[in-house]
Amino acid sequence: MFQRILVPVDGSRPSVEAVLYSEYFFKAFGSEIVLLHVISPEMIARQEKVGTNPGEMAAEVLDVSERALRRKGIAATSLVLEGPVAGRICATVLSEKCDLVIMGGRSVLDIPDFLVDSVSEKVSHYARSPVIVVRNLLPLKTLLVAYDGSRSSQRALDVAGEIALRARARLRLVEIKNEGLVPPSESPTGAKILEWHLDMAQRGLTVDMDLRLGKPAEKVIRLAQERAIGLVVIGGSGGEAGREGPGSVTDQVLKGCPSAVMVVK
């Protein structure tokens, strides 16, 4: 499923955690890891003022990331590009044929680092692949997937199930509605969930079902906190105007969830 993983790095704590987090997917899927350092125009201007060399900094950042992976027995390919950070990351997904991006995002309590959420959010919205934004290194023992019946959430359900199977993790499925909770047998989405649940159970996956009433983003974030979730998987529109902008459920979860968050198109 994930043959090539792109990991943008800049030397900040969140990007280091993203490098370490990629080990879970290397072990589960045997993925190739591609490290990318983007030298932005702002970085060049800032480093020229202090007399440092952007190319030397890029080499150092990549060397640290490569050594961290080698200690875990993982070889990686490294790239250096110049230009707008989010745009170069999204373009590299296509040019390098990557099917997953794992990148750092600042903690909800941190002062922004270079890979600030504006970059990770842009990439999660517009990259032509699933994107994981890492904010901690909780073990990938439990996944939480949010389901609302949409095509993207069905895709998120399938992806989360496959990750859980490969990583030998538990999966918690939460269906959240603003009003009118009904039994699965009476719900328009219930039949799909039950069919998926039966298939996963036959394949040996443990799934915990959860129905919640309330605001979707708030419930997802609270469940992630309460259950120490290693990865939250949520559907995204893949850049469709208005669907993932400020205030959307995906945007709120990306901004407020302390767990790693995966956006699936």
Image: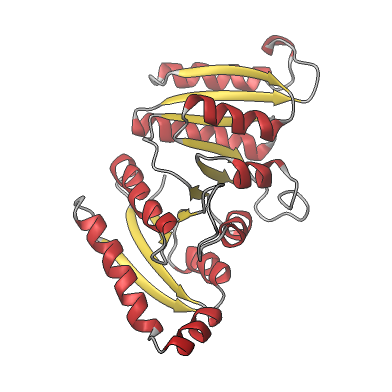
Q: Look at 29% across and 47% down and name the residue there.
A: 30
Query: Nearest the camera: 75 or 220?
Result: 220
Q: Look at 60% across and 33% down and name the residue there.
A: 221
**In this picture, is 136 found above or below 106?**
above
**In this picture, is 36 found above or below 195?**
below
Looking at the image, which residue sits at the far right?
Answer: 179
Residue 129 in view: yes
Residue 159 in view: no
Q: Give the quadrant of the N terminus.
A: top left
Q: Look at 34% across and 28% down and name the residue there.
A: 168
Percent across and percent down for residue 227 are 49, 25
Q: Look at 26% across and 63% down and name the residue there.
A: 66
Percent across and percent down for residue 179 are 80, 21
* Left or right: 148 as drawn, with respect to 104: right
Residue 167 falls in image quadrant: top left
Percent across and percent down for residue 16 are 37, 56
* Left or right: 128 as drawn, with respect to 49: right
**In this picture, is 248 found above or below 95?**
above
Percent across and percent down for residue 47 are 45, 84
Total numbered badges shown on the rendered structure: 0
* Left or right: 11 as drawn, with respect to 240: left
Query: Nearest the camera: 214 or 177?
Result: 214
Query: Nearest the camera: 62 or 45?
Result: 45
Residue 150 falls in image quadrant: top right
Colour convention = secondary structure
